[in-house]
Image (cartoon, helix red, strand yellow):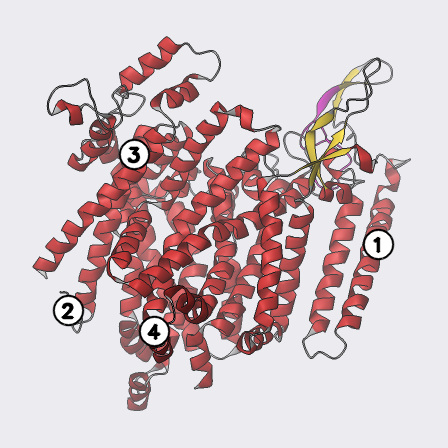
Amino acid sequence: MFAYIIRRLLYAIPILIGVNLITFFLFFVVNSPGDVARAHLGEKYVTQDAIDNWVQEKGYHYPLMFNGEAEGLAKATDTIFFQKSLKLFTFDFGQADDGRNISSDVLTRMGPSLALAVPSFIIGIWVNICVALVVVMFRGTRLDKAAIALLVSLMSISGLFYIIGGQYIVATLWRLVPISGFEPGPMAWKFLILPIIIGVVSGIGLGARWYRTLFLESADQDFARTARAKGVSELGVLFRHVLPNALLPILTGIVVVIPSLFMGSLLMEAFFGIPGLGSYMLDAIRAQDFAIVRTMVFVGSVLYIIGLILTDISYTIADPRVRLN
Amino acid sequence: MDIDIFSVKPVILWTDIMIWLLVISASAFLLMLRQNPEARAQWRQVFSSRLGMVTFVIILSYIALALVDSLHFRKALPPVEGQNSSTVYYSNTVHSVLDLALGEMGELKERSYSAPLSLKSFTKENMIDASGEPYRDYPDLQHAGSHLNDPADYNTDLLLQSATGMGKGLIVGLILCTLLKMSTRRSTFPWGAAMATILVIAMVLGWLIHMGNLYHVLGTDRAGNDALYASIKGIRTGVLIGTLATLIMMPIAITLGIFAGYFRGWVDDVVQYLYTTLSSIPGILLIAAAILQFQVFIDLNPGYFEVGLEKADARFLGLCFILGITSWAGLCRLLRAETLKISQLPYVQAAHAFGVSHIRVISRHILPNVMHIILITFVLDFSGLILAEAVLSYIGVGVDSTMPSWGNMINLARSELSQDPVVWWNLIGAFFFMFTLVLSANLFSDLVNDAFNPKNRQERAV
């Protein structure tokens, strides 16, 4: 397995280079840094000097791929591609357009993001699986049909309405929790509980329906029938026999997103004023801070690839028959 | 809005062309499928359920509204005194055929908020009475209930006009139902359900359009625009994004997916590398980056666009494109796996043995056998894309802020629930129109998936 992981990690390198090339193309080839500067500084009443200044200050004044004026190795290193794109591989993220250090921003904002994303994720899966198993218990009855209709209706509501509606009812009408904000430390739960609940509720429709189809596949198979014949209760059959047998497809869906939990949730953090990476990205997008967006694209890709590798490893743990080679 | 047919200049947007092309090719595709007995049986299964009929009629009416809203034109301005009358100048606002059907609904602008069906503005203003004394009260709306002689008639008028509007809708609905009845006399499908849906939709639309010209049925937003009009105009954006985004990515996904599964070897490696790379970039960031860069390009090259709407349209097309790119990998992966399986089957091997060319094997033996995957993906993605549009517009990387869309409505109204007194009607408008479409699409796609997915068919057979 060790050799397998090493090989997968090596395979990740060309993918990350590809990601790098795509972002490089998007951010520097589609529009030259001068164009971006012009859009940033206002389109009409901006002098060439101001543009040059901005470009120089941010370090975008190098040629794109090849610097003919430089000497020796600097021909390749004094370029935008090397300075802005390749340096990401060393996790040297440089500075945002407003001059702040991106690496330290990412580190400080990771905490609040995780504090929101991890509980939402774990509780969400647990609730979805329980709902799905209960629905499967009533399979073939009217209750099953009604439950599916409810789940499809729930998944047809935009996530924005869950957030806006939940915030209105719980925070504005009932005044149970503060509307938005954040406080580090143990008192953070006050601010986190509502977004976590909304996150879980808004995911039930899609999640529980998906798990239901997975459980249905094994609910009437021979091993389940044998268990019932032995006198195991229906709940016991579902939790002890059906659930473990549906574990592989469940793992496929969830392990891959675990590393990406670091990235936080864009919408939740924005609506509830939580200073995590999600709102960091949203602010960067709204302020058109391309340096931050570029960094987060890279970080997101790295986390996704880690997620893919973790998924494969989790297979071997969940199912001893799976061998990685 | 009276209109002289000779004084308009058509405006042809790229997305207009594409949606009409899509409709034409989809009809051709369906006609082609009619010849395939298996596909006919599958469609029969979809439409033999009442739910399938009802949801299909609802989706069809949304698509019809979107199509009518995709015929754009500019009206000629009345000639100015002393100006050479041989040159005609055209207005800078672009209308669509749907605007004609909606009457004056889009032009009834108030100053600010007003509640649904209200006669008065939502906020108090300083006014001066007949004797010149200043006082503070809710001013009358300019365009709501202006046909009333006495405000006391309000309640009876509401009932009367509602009956008129629904009656008009009912007549149109009955005509449509009679036509349907005549053309489907001997068929066994649940046409009753379809007719009931048509009648309900016709009555609701008749009521909305009739009342929308007399009152603000869903109130007005902060800038005084009619919320019902904005919701109806949002239909085109929703339907187009749900269809065009998938359509744009389909040729790439189909070609690469089938090639990877068919030729294997280095082709497969390259395609797998491409989709792993693309899907490893967080979708929302890729979309944001692409749209922001595209917007910079649009802003720096205003020369390409004649009217503002064309800029918004270019951005919209860009959005469809990048949404297609981000969802491309899923379909490509499915097609690759299925092609790998099919190309091992005896009839493909036999075709090879007879010396049939690769192109012919792919088009005759492989493509028809993966059609169900393409169809299912198209239907399943539709509702997800509509929901995605709302989120992207909220973040600021969706459609242009001047373009009517449900996402933009929600974005404008997001803080209105925390106002006191609460303003809820803008959110309700967007919610109602969006929820109906997405729910119908989800239910319909489930039925299509059940009918076309071979895995489900085996389960039923057992």
Callout 2 amino acid: Arg
Callout in the foreground (3, 4):
4
Disc marking residue A323: 2
Where residue B232 sits, quadrant-wise, is top right
What range is drawn magenta here? B109-126
> Is label 2 on the same chain as label 1?
no
| Viewer-closest of A36 and B259 | B259
Disc 1 element: helix
What residue is shown with label 1? B168
- Give the crowd class for mark 3: few <14, some 14-19, many >=20 residues within 10 Å: some
| Viewer-closest of B63 and B139 | B63
Callout in the foreground (3, 1):
3
- Give the crowd class for mark 2: few <14, some 14-19, many >=20 residues within 10 Å: few
Where residue A180 sits, quadrant-wise, is top left
Q: Chain of mark 2?
A: A
> Is label 2 on the same chain as label 4?
no
Q: Earlier in the sequence, mark 3 or mark 2?
A: 3
Q: Is residue B74 left or right of residue B235?
A: right
Residue in the picture at 53% in, 77% down: B38
Is residue B119 inside the magenta stretch?
A: yes
Residue in the picture at 25% in, 26% down: A80
Q: CA distance from mark 2 to mark 4?
A: 35 Å
- Give the crowd class for mark 1: few <14, some 14-19, many >=20 residues within 10 Å: some
Verify CB contact (< 8 Å) between mark 2 and mark 1. Answer: no
Callout 1 amino acid: Lys
